Amino acid sequence: MKIDCIFCKIINKEINSDIIFEDEKTIVFKDIYPKAPVHWLIVPKKHIETHMEITEEDQELMGHLHIITQKVAKKNSINNYKLIMNCGYEAGQRVFHIHLHLLSGKILGEV
Ligand code: 5GP
Ligand code: ZN
């Protein structure tokens, strides 16, 4: 938990979000500014700032993130989608708590 992190606040329910799925290690919620008809964020509850900070210790967690993504997609009959993870400000990252964007349908603008 990082005190000034917006996603940590969402995880701790200090900020409201439209939650699709949650378990002990992960949360999936709708992006507040959707860039596609389906635009969800798949977020590990562990605060990791960027893709570059993932360590060997996080291997299982990263695998879990993908399994959850796939299950949530299947459960909602989303069979065609894009996964994006921005790493670093210049790559478009604005929230420094790693997350996968799941997008389905026509993408409007840059993610
Ligand atoms: P990034 O640019 O870091 O890859 O993606 C951050 C995403 O988080 C953006 O698509 C943005 O719309 C979304 N976002 C930022 N703040 C909030 C928030 O408070 N609630 C929700 N649900 N999404 C947010
Ligand atoms: Zn965080």
Image (spheres, rainbow, N blue to C red):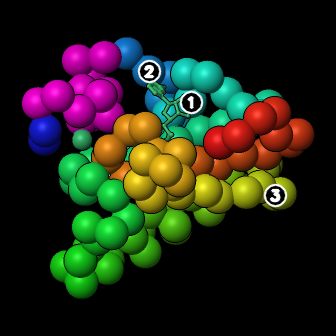
Residue at point 24% right, 27% down?
9
Find the distance from the CA under tag 1 to the CA under tag 3.
Answer: 17 Å
Residue type marked 2? Ser
| Residue 60 belongs to the span the image colors magenta | no
Q: Nearer the viewer, residue 33 or 109?
A: 109
Q: Report x, y in % for residue 72.
A: 60, 51
Element under disc 1: strand
Q: Is residue 35 visible?
A: yes
Q: Residue under circle 3?
A: 79
Residue at point 23% right, 77% down?
55
Q: Residue furthest bottom?
A: 56
State if disc 1 and disc 2 touch (CB < 8 Å). Answer: yes
Query: Reading the chain from its start, which is encountered first: label 2 or label 1?
Result: 2
Relative height, residue 25 to residue 34 (above, below): below
Q: Report x, y in % for residue 105.
A: 86, 42
Label 1 neighbour load within 10 Å: few <14, some 14-19, many 20+: some
Q: Residue furthest front?
A: 90
| Residue 13 belongs to the span the image colors magenta | yes
Say whether mark 1 is within 8 Å of ligand 1. yes
Q: Residue 30 has which mark?
A: 1
Which quadrant does the N terminus fall into? top left
Say whether mark 2 is within 8 Å of ligand 1. yes
Say whether mark 3 is within 8 Å of ligand 1. no
Q: Residue under circle 2?
A: 17
Stretch in magenta: 3-15
Residue at point 73% right, 57% down?
82
Please state if 27 lies on the left or on the right of 76 as rendered: left
Please state if 64 lies on the left or on the right of 18 as rendered: left
Q: Report x, y in % for residue 15.
A: 31, 17
State if disc 2 and disc 3 touch (CB < 8 Å). Answer: no
